[in-house]
Image (cartoon, helix red, strand yellow):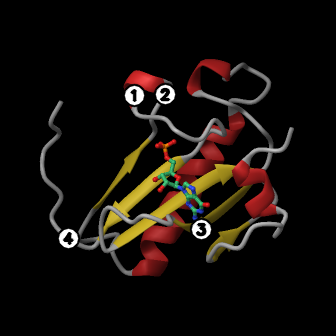
Amino acid sequence: MATLFTKIIAREIPAKIIYENDQVCAFLDIHPQAPHHVLIVPKIEIATLNDLTPDNIHYISALFLAAKHIAHDLGVADAGYRVVMNCNKDGGQTVYHLHLHLLAGQELGSFGV
Ligand code: 5GP
């Protein structure tokens, strides 16, 4: 069954898509936690970090390269930004399609638990 993010990539569910290439798609988070909050997702369905294998690991490189490009395009590369990937329930994952959060636009606090 297609994930929520697969439906966004296919334009079946609306989202503000800001970047795309053959491997990844990036769009604005519907509930932003910072002035800039972008979700960067692989165009194949990898559920969690636990599902990475030698065959799909290149998508991690693609996610981080996209984050670098997006941060530059948003004008936040020098000021700084944070990338976060949550894994499973205790990690705060709610959508089971691997994704990188890119947060920027203000000084971000240190991590709490
Ligand atoms: P997770 O908690 O799995 O790491 O992150 C999932 C993210 O997806 C959350 O930040 C949430 O706000 C975002 N999200 C959930 N549903 C939608 C949606 O329909 N559209 C968009 N653009 N973001 C969504």
Residue 66 in the image: above or below residue 77: above
Q: Quadrant of the C terminus?
A: top left
Choose the circle earlier in sequence order: 3 or 2.
Answer: 3
How many numbered tags mark residues here? 4
Along the horizontal axis of the image, is 27 left or right of 55? left
Q: Secondary structure at mark 3?
A: strand
Establish whether ligand 1 lies closer than 8 Å to the Cβ of label 2: no
Choose the circle earlier in sequence order: 3 or 4.
Answer: 3
Choose the circle earlier in sequence order: 3 or 1.
Answer: 3
Q: Residues within 10 Å of mark 2 (few under 14, many from 20)?
A: some
**Residue at 83% across / 67% down in the picture?**
12
**Could you say where residue 64 lies in the image, as x and y percent from the top left?**
53, 50
**Could you say where residue 70 lies in the image, as x and y percent from the top left?**
51, 70
> What numbered label is drawn on residue 87?
2
Establish whether ligand 1 lies closer than 8 Å to the Cβ of label 1: yes
Q: Secondary structure at mark 2?
A: loop
User: Disc 4 vs disc 1: which is toward the camera?
Assistant: 1
Q: Which residue is mark 3?
A: 27
Q: Which residue is mark 1?
A: 91
**Residue at 83% across / 44% down in the picture?**
2
Q: Amino acid at mark 2?
A: Cys
Picture quarter containing residue 90?
A: top left
Q: Amino acid at mark 3?
A: Phe
Establish whether ligand 1 lies closer than 8 Å to the Cβ of label 3: yes
Q: Amino acid at mark 4?
A: Gln
Choose the circle earlier in sequence order: 2 or 4.
Answer: 2
Q: Secondary structure at mark 1?
A: helix
Q: CA distance from mark 3 to mark 4?
A: 19 Å
Q: Nearer the viewer, residue 97 or 82?
A: 97
Q: Which residue is mark 4?
A: 106
